[in-house]
Image (cartoon, rainbow, N blue to C red):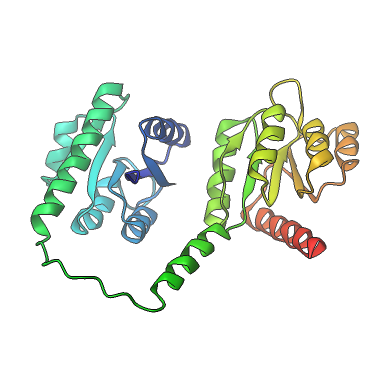
Amino acid sequence: MSKKKILIVEDELITATDIKFRLEDMGYEIIGIVSDGEKAIKTALNKKPNLVLMDVGLKGDMNGIEASQKILEDGINVIYLTGHDGQKILEESNFTNVDVIKKPFDDNEFKNTIEESIGKSEAANKETIPKQPQKKPIKKPNQQKENKTAEVSKENKDTILVVEDEMITALDIKLRLEDFGYNVPGTIAYGEEAVEKADEVNPDLILMDIMLKGEMNGIEATQEIQKTKDIPIIFLTANTNKKIIENALKTTPSGYISKPFNDRELKYIIEIAIKKSKDSKN
């Protein structure tokens, strides 16, 4: 059974991260975290989640109630997230098929409201979609080939492993990389785990923070990985200590990015590193 998909619309990154982890623990798939109304509409209409969790007080020109209007019109259920009186929010929105969860979240209320909203959405879809007579499927000559091509296309996404011990920074990097079109199997905060994960996933590239939690730092983790794997590694650091940088460069990394970095810089260095790695193996 496929996981139900949820879009998170929340402009406070710490709150968004907390929601994401709660939902994943409950078995849901998070298709994205967005922080403004315009992007929420675009993402929801494009990816068609089963549910949108919408913060009411979004920053910018469009609040959550305004953003939810087009999403609801498309038949996608919305739950408002607010620190205010939920009943007043519902009255202001004037929508009947919306639920409210008040911040801070109660675990049981959070879980039950989401399950009920998705259940109502599925029931409504069954009622509004007429059953069509069953027809014997006609096999198209190229149908199997097209399906395989779609699967291969998905599998062909370059995979990047993110090793970063600051949770907020790690999530930010993960979301950026996914926006670039990369597959990110997860984020890791410890050097020892990074070595194990690199062996398990065999990613196309690793973004490695130098200062990690635990006994093994990013430089040491890189040295361990390089003993058995030929994976391009780019160091991430806010540290300008000359000795640390010299030690990092001794591992001949594929790149070095100083924090904070912008999207263009990150994307460019990653593309060059992956291309060079692939060219050297051909």
Q: Quadrant of residue 11?
A: top left
Count up the numbered dots.
0
- Place of residue 140 in the rendered image (x, y in percent of width and height, measured from the top left): 34, 77
| Camera-nearest residue between 137 and 98 | 137
Looking at the image, residue 140 sits to the left or right of residue 204; the answer is: left
Looking at the image, residue 261 sits to the left or right of residue 49; the answer is: right
The residue shown at (71%, 27%) is 192
Task: Note whether 4 is above or below 280 in the view shown.
Answer: above
Q: Quadrant of residue 93?
A: top left
Check the image and name the residue furthest to the bottom: 141
Q: Split into 4 quadrants, where in the image is the N terminus?
A: top left
Mark yes or no: residue 34 visible. no
| Camera-nearest residue between 65 and 221 | 221
| Camera-nearest residue between 81 and 279 | 279
Looking at the image, residue 236 sits to the left or right of residue 139; the answer is: right
- Place of residue 115 in the rendered image (x, y in percent of width and height, measured from the top left): 23, 35
The residue shown at (72%, 29%) is 191
Task: Note whether 101 is above or below 281 in the view shown.
Answer: above
- Place of residue 125 in the rendered image (x, y in percent of width and height, measured from the top left): 15, 53
Q: Split into 4 quadrants, where in the image is the C terminus?
A: bottom right
- Place of residue 68 in the rendered image (x, y in percent of width and height, measured from the top left): 25, 51
Mark yes or no: residue 7 visible. yes
The residue shown at (24%, 58%) is 70
The residue shown at (30%, 22%) is 107
Looking at the image, residue 216 sits to the left or right of residue 252; the answer is: left
